[in-house]
Image (cartoon, helix red, strand yellow):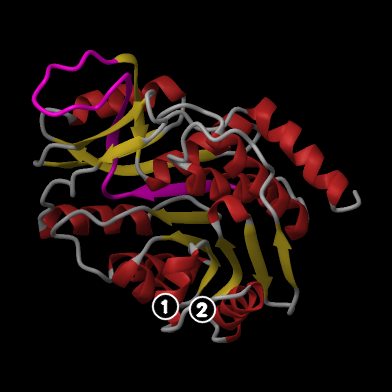
Amino acid sequence: MRIRTVTVNPAIDYASVVDHLLPTLKLRTREERFDPGGGGINVARVIRELGGVDVAALYMAGGVTGPVFEGLLARTGIPGSRIPIAGDTRIAHVVRETATGHEYRFTPRGPEVTEAEWRACLDAVAALDADVLVLSGSLAPGIPADFYARCVRAVRPRGVRVAVDASGPALFHALAEGVWLVKPNLAEAEALLGRRATAPEAEEELARELVARGRAELVALTLGHRGAVLAARDGTVRRLSAPRVPTVSTVGAGDAFLGAMLWALARGRPVAEAFRWAVAAGAATALTPGTGLCCRAHVEALFRGLETAAGG
């Protein structure tokens, strides 16, 4: 199964550690690291880390920071295709304060994208050699809210399965087209259906209703440290609690969840097993500092625990 990810608002993710976060003073940071980021890029990184699946990334990047992003992506070994833009690729900064354990995230909106640039990206999406198309992450300024929906329509004639992880109008318009897999968090699902879920049964009903309305064949509703709910078109609903791990950073945990689930499905694993891989990868990412994502050894260890809890 060939998986192709699309990231229209990638970021150079910069993470560092500081003892105390204070105003005005010059603060000395340490443990700096730089990673290529953005929803689809992170999904591809996780699939690459788990191995054995054909994955590549399509992304928009440019300006003076664009070549830096390209270099960081090249380090991962993920094949990438760039749609050039004039604006500077954004730089996101994550700072962990050791005195409190708090994590602070500074995330720019991203560069302004012209109509010619986003239409070039849409044309590239339509031409992708893919079995699964992953539309993940925020839309940069200038890109229309229905861009992901346009991507769904562009690949539908070829029978490409589409997985979506977005929010707000971008998610609403994409789901109006109907997709194979969607991974909303609880707040996103509540916004889509216009009601709050105040009990586990209500959370499961949100996932079930998105399937029943024809919005997606599979709905993986993530609940942060509480785990996730999976609803499928065959009527089954599953809930998994997240493994208890010492949380270092939750950056990219949702992307890791989606990446691992797609990886397992691409390897021909049953949906229930793919769901366990997803929950394991989300928890494993919480073990990793800053903008680092999960490592395969941690994912496998946590998966084995979930497999035992599920009875094999």
- Quick one: label 1, few (<14), some, or many (20+) residues within 10 Å? some
Q: Which mark is residue 97?
A: none
Q: Is 1 placed above or below 17 here?
A: below
Q: Which residues are magenta?
A: 1-29
Quick check: marks 2 and 1 in contact, CB under 8 Å? yes
Give x and y (percent) for residue 64: 11, 28
SS for callout 2: loop
Q: Nearer the viewer, residue 188 or 133?
A: 188
SS for callout 1: helix
Badge 2 amino acid:
Arg
Give x and y (percent) for residue 46: 54, 36
Q: Nearer the viewer, residue 5 or 128?
A: 5
Left/right placement of residue 123 relative to residue 178 reads left
Q: Which mark is residue 192?
A: 1
Q: Is 241 placed above or below 193 here?
A: above
Whether residue 44 is in magenta: the answer is no
Q: Earlier in the sequence, mark 2 or mark 1?
A: 1
Residue under the point 27% across and 15% down: 29
Residue under the point 47% across and 79% down: 196
- In the picture of the structure, the residue carrying the numbered disc 2 is 215
Q: Nearer the viewer, residue 97 or 302?
A: 97
- Furthest-right residue in this view: 311
- Quick one: label 2, few (<14), some, or many (20+) residues within 10 Å? many
Residue under the point 18% across and 49% down: 109
Alpha-carbon distance for marks 2 and 1?
A: 11 Å
Badge 1 amino acid:
Leu
The image quarter in which residue 48 lies: top right
Give x and y (percent) for residue 209: 58, 83
Q: Nearer the viewer, mark 2 or mark 1?
A: 1
Give x and y (percent) for residue 131: 56, 55
- Furthest-bottom residue in this view: 213
Left/right placement of residue 193 relative to residue 272 reads left
